[in-house]
């Protein structure tokens, strides 16, 4: 660019080269392991010599798992999770940034506090709630035996969300990262946007739909892709929430390739092959949309 | 539809036929890989063998997640009729009031056909079986016959003294890893104590009450662990981190280590890895000289019947348990997985079939043998609260000792103190519950 | 001031209500149900739970293991998020230059996002295998110089590197996009005033990057906390000798592997307090320094 640009560019190239190698090395190792047979693996453990069994492993994974069905489940769940997160984040962030109402910071704090406690630590109680979404309604109606006095019996509504796409996706949406990112984006928008819209006669909802939403298309799309991949690799909750094999996601289905007994040595070649097969879709997604992700997350409107 | 093969099954079918219609029930299991395939095969066979009931087998991806989900499901009333749990969860389930003892549910079965080592682990202290043993394994002693012979050892060691003598010979012959273990309490504490007839905790390992205390930090058990540490100093014993593979079984399979104590379930992988390169022997685990041999404990998992289901569902569950108990089912499962059959009639059937020496049954007879040694009050099993947490504490403290941060005696004393705290809290949690 | 312009009383509540409902059902209600256990001795299958007041808290607060795990967790959150942001920042600054490798690297550096954290653990465990991995030649020359299975310091290094690997994508993208949004004219003007590259980094790029850095810090601190579970579970199980036993992992093991629901819930409650404190600090001290104007 300006002064000694060449030496800066050379340093940049070296750094990027190192970074790329650092990122690729583990992936290369996955690819190599996927080409070995279980027998090779038992004799040599992990090794850096490629084998010749990749397609055998692919065929084995294909026959041991129900990939077409599970990949469809993954697509649906990941799309629901990321779509839901984007929608929730958009309306919440709009409320947080563009309203001068007193309780708004409280709402924001309540949402952001959820970022740090992973769902792994709430599995049992989230399951309890998901198995009957009407739990809080029942509890409220039955406080002090009120419902029983009025209607003769305590209220006992049942609404089981387990083993459904909604039941798998909804608890995964309860995480405030999207809100945080969109709030930051909205804060970088020109200050008089809302004032100008009002002068043109638009109310808050019109402003949101006609001005803010088009402006946010880029960030929302990036977030969608980003959360989609995140939802794709989620393991613990989809495993617990899907009681029937038909509802399992692809990453959960891969667990089937794990060792049969606690004492067994895992069939890593097979597991790595499965990991590659399941990762292909998000990887292609990244490769195709990388420019869009980068542009969309700029947190600023140029 | 195929015709029912055994008397047990037809009996089950006749009781079921008396009802208006059978039921569709769920069975939750935790295994994956080839064991899962074998379980699903058994389910398919059951559903094909009769039309009264339908069992749907649902994999949970692992024992621990399966247990977690069962807890959540039970609390929400969504639990299945049949569920498989692993050995360490036995006490929690017995005290849970969420299960029905199988012996109460199906009294007219010859439960004594289950060999002592497998039975005692899952029975109440007054001798009623709580759950039906399913995939069972136990601890065995593996040697790389070829490497031992190269070092001039022709007889498989039977005592620790002989193991160490062999280890010295191997070391002199330039072998870098004579004996390998991961020092997991299942191996170096529970199975060791059981076969030497020693308790790891008072009240017969907790069978006689929740007010038990740990007592493994003394006597032969403490001596053995101290020995392990000093043998490791001498290079005779290696632990996971000392091996290239980072795992004792992998190190044995690759020929890196010559001897190991491992689960009966490790046989198939070892055999496969050895191929024609090495010979393998599988025997009972070594004893210290001058001690009488008692039974080793059963590992693996058993099937439990959960409360809160209708009569028809219970009938279906009974029929499925009856089906799994048949000798031919047990042997098919053994052949597919390497787990050990655990009833005497299955063992008879194996002998009668003439396939007892076939590779897929190689661990079956020695496995039964070691679990069927004379039992004592202290070799029945482990019935101690928060035991999974205790195992972690034991690993943590002994690892520190192996790494030289404290002596083995200090490690054992600390593990005892911390373990006793867990026992007291468990006792308080289950204050009003009765241990049968 | 800020963008806050509308003054409707209830509209923002209705706008946020879908989010609040989801949060209530699947975050606050489950956390509340778990907190109930913290004041009881709770049996896994329910039934017979006894109220014990603050006894669980007294016990946990007196437990050295808890404090050690908490200390490790806090140090890890700081160091892990710091190191991953630093590496991602350096890479983003490099990728911001129009060098030939830049488009490819921008693509490659997002790939780790598609790999589940548990697989990351398995992979790096092999890469740092003292006998077979990338540092094995070093061990051939100096036996025992590298052994993450025994030496806790080495174990930590291994975990940090695995964490950096899996954390690169998000931080990298968000910082890169921020850098690209800085107008070229600012650079040129500063260069004409005689500001060198370091000077421009300090005076132009970093200040204008503060919104992105803030997001990166908040989310990386959170990710390092929740990601630590998968890494510890697959790589060390808290070892050697408990040296890497962090709170998220410890809570999971206590509660869901060992069925000590009350102990786990009590520790979760304590962790929540710490997390709330850290979040508050981030907003009080960091967000003030964020420059939103362009």
Image: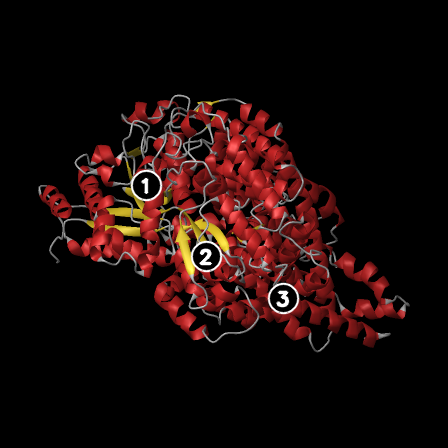
Mark 3 neighbour density, 10 Å: few (under 14) some (14–19) many (20 or more): many
Query: Residue B420 location in percent, x, y?
Result: 52, 27
Please check whether the numbered discs 3 and 2 fall on a single chain: no
Which numbered tag is attached to residue B372? 1
Q: Is residue B50 left or right of residue A3?
A: left
* Residue C215 visible in the current orientation: no
Circle nearer the viewer, 1 or 3: 1
Q: Is residue B70 above or below residue C87?
A: above
Query: Residue A137 location in percent, x, y?
Result: 39, 35
Mark 1 neighbour density, 10 Å: few (under 14) some (14–19) many (20 or more): some
Q: Is residue C189 left or right of residue B72?
A: right
Query: Residue B172 location in percent, x, y?
Result: 60, 57
Q: Is residue B349 left or right of residue A183?
A: left
| Foreground residue among B23 and C88 | B23
Circle nearer the viewer, 3 or 2: 2
Q: Is residue B378 above or below residue B57?
A: above
Q: Which residue is mark 3?
A: A23
Q: What distance separates the C-alpha of mark 3 from that of mark 2?
A: 51 Å
Q: What secondary structure is found at the residue carrying circle 1?
A: loop
Circle nearer the viewer, 1 or 2: 2
Chain to which mark 2 belongs: B
| Foreground residue among C45 and B221 | B221
Mark 2 neighbour density, 10 Å: few (under 14) some (14–19) many (20 or more): few
Q: What secondary structure is found at the residue carrying circle 3?
A: helix
Q: What distance separates the C-alpha of mark 1 from that of mark 3?
A: 54 Å
């Amino acid at each position: 660019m300006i002064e000694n640009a060449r030496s800066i560019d050379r340093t940049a190239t070296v750094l990027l080269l190192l970074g790329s190698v650092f990122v690729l090395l583990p992936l290369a190792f996955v690819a190599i392991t996927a080409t070995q047979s279980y027998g090779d693996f038992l004799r040599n453990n992990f090794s850096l010599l490629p084998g010749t069994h990749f397609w055998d492993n692919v065929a084995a994974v294909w026959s041991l798992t129900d990939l077409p069905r599970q990949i469809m489940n993954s697509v649906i769940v990941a799309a629901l999770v990321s779509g839901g997160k984007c929608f929730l984040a958009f309306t919440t962030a709009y409320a947080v940034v563009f309203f001068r109402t007193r309780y708004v910071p409280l709402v924001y704090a309540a949402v952001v506090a959820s970022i740090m406690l992973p769902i792994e630590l709430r599995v049992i109680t989230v399951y309890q709630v998901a198995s009957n979404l009407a739990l809080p309604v029942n509890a409220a109606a039955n406080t002090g035996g009120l419902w029983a006095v009025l209607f003769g019996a305590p209220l006992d509504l049942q609404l089981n969300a387990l083993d459904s796409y909604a039941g798998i996706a909804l608890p995964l949406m309860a995480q405030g990262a999207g809100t945080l990112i969109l709030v930051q984006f909205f804060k970088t928008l020109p200050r008089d946007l809302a004032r100008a819209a009002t002068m043109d006669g638009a109310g808050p909802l019109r402003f949101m739909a006609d001005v803010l939403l088009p402006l946010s298309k880029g960030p929302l799309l990036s977030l969608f892709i980003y959360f989609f991949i995140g939802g794709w690799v989620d393991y613990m909750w989809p495993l617990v929430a899907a009681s029937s094999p038909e509802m399992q996601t692809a990453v959960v289905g891969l667990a089937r390739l794990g060792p049969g007994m606690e004492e067994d040595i895992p069939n890593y070649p097979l597991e790595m092959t499965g990991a590659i097969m399941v990762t292909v879709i998000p990887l292609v997604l990244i490769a195709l949309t990388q420019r869009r992700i980068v542009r969309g997350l700029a947190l600023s409107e140029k | 539809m195929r015709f029912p093969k055994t008397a047990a099954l037809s009996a089950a079918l006749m009781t079921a036929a008396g009802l208006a219609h059978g039921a569709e029930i769920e069975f939750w299991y935790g295994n994956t890989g080839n064991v899962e395939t074998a379980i699903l095969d058994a389910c398919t066979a059951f559903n094909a063998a009769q039309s009264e009931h339908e069992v749907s087998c649902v994999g949970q991806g692992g024992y621990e997640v399966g247990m977690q989900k069962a807890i959540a499901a039970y609390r929400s009333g969504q639990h299945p009729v049949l569920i498989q749990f692993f050995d360490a969860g036995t006490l929690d389930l017995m005290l849970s009031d969420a299960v029905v003892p199988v012996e109460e549910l199906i009294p007219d079965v010859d439960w004594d056909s289950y060999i002592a080592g497998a039975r005692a682990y899952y029975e109440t202290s007054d001798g009623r079986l709580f759950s039906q043993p399913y995939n069972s394994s136990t601890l065995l002693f593996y040697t790389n016959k070829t490497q031992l012979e190269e070092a001039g050892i022709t007889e498989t060691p039977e005592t620790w003294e002989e193991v160490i003598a062999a280890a010295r010979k191997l070391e002199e012959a330039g072998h870098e890893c004579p004996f390998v273990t991961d020092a997991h309490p299942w191996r170096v504490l529970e199975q060791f104590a059981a076969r030497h007839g020693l308790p790891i905790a008072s009240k017969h390992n907790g069978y006689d009450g929740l007010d038990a205390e740990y007592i493994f930090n003394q006597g032969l058990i403490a001596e053995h662990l101290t020995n392990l540490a000093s043998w490791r100093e001498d290079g005779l014993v290696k632990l996971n981190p000392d091996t290239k593979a980072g795992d004792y079984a992998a190190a044995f399979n690759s020929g890196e280590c010559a001897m190991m104590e491992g689960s009966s379930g490790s046989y198939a992988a070892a055999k496969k890895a050895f191929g024609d390169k090495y010979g393998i022997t599988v025997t009972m685990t070594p004893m210290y000289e001058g001690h009488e041999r008692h039974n080793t404990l059963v590992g693996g998992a058993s099937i439990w019947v959960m409360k809160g289901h209708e009569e028809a569902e219970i009938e279906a569950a009974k029929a499925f348990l009856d089906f799994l108990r048949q000798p031919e089912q047990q042997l098919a499962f053994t052949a597919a997985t390497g787990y050990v059959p655990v009833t005497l009639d299955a063992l008879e059937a194996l002998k009668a079939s003439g396939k007892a020496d076939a590779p897929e049954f190689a661990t079956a007879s020695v496995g039964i043998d070691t679990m069927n040694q004379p039992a004592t009050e202290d070799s029945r099993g482990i019935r101690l609260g928060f035991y999974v947490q205790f195992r972690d504490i034991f690993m943590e403290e002994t690892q520190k000792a192996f790494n030289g941060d404290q002596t083995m005696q200090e490690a054992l004393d600390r593990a005892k103190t911390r373990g006793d705290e867990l026992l007291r809290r468990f006792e308080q949690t289950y204050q009003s519950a009765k241990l049968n | 001031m800020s963008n806050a312009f509308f003054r409707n009383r209830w509209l923002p509540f209705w706008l946020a209500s879908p989010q609040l409902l989801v949060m209530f059902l699947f975050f606050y209600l489950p956390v509340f149900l778990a907190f109930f256990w913290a004041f009881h001795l709770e049996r896994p299958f329910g039934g017979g739970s006894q109220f014990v007041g603050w006894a669980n808290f007294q016990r946990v607060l007196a437990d050295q293991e808890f404090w050690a795990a908490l200390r490790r967790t806090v140090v890890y959150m700081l160091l892990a998020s710091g190191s991953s942001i630093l590496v991602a920042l350096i890479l983003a600054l490099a990728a911001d230059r129009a060098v030939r490798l830049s488009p490819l690297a921008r693509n490659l550096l997002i790939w780790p996002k598609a790999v589940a954290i548990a697989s990351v653990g398995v992979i790096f465990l092999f890469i740092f295998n003292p006998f077979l991995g990338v540092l094995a030649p070093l061990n051939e020359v100096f036996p025992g110089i590298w052994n993450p299975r025994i030496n806790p310091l080495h174990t930590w290094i291994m975990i940090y590197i695995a964490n950096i690997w899996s954390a690169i994508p998000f931080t990298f993208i968000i910082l890169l996009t921020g850098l690209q949004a800085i107008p070229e004219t600012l650079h040129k003007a500063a260069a004409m005033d005689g500001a060198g590259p370091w000077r421009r980094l300090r005076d132009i790029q970093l200040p204008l990057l503060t919104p992105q850095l803030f997001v990166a810090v908040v989310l990386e601190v959170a990710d390092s906390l929740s990601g630590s579970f998968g890494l510890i579970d697959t790589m060390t199980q808290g070892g050697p000798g408990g040296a890497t036993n962090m709170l998220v992992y410890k809570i999971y093991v206590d509660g869901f592997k060992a069925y000590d629901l009350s102990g786990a819930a009590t520790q979760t409650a304590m962790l929540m307090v710490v997390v709330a404190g850290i979040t508050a600090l981030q907003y009080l001290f960091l967000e003030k320094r964020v420059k939103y104007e362009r």
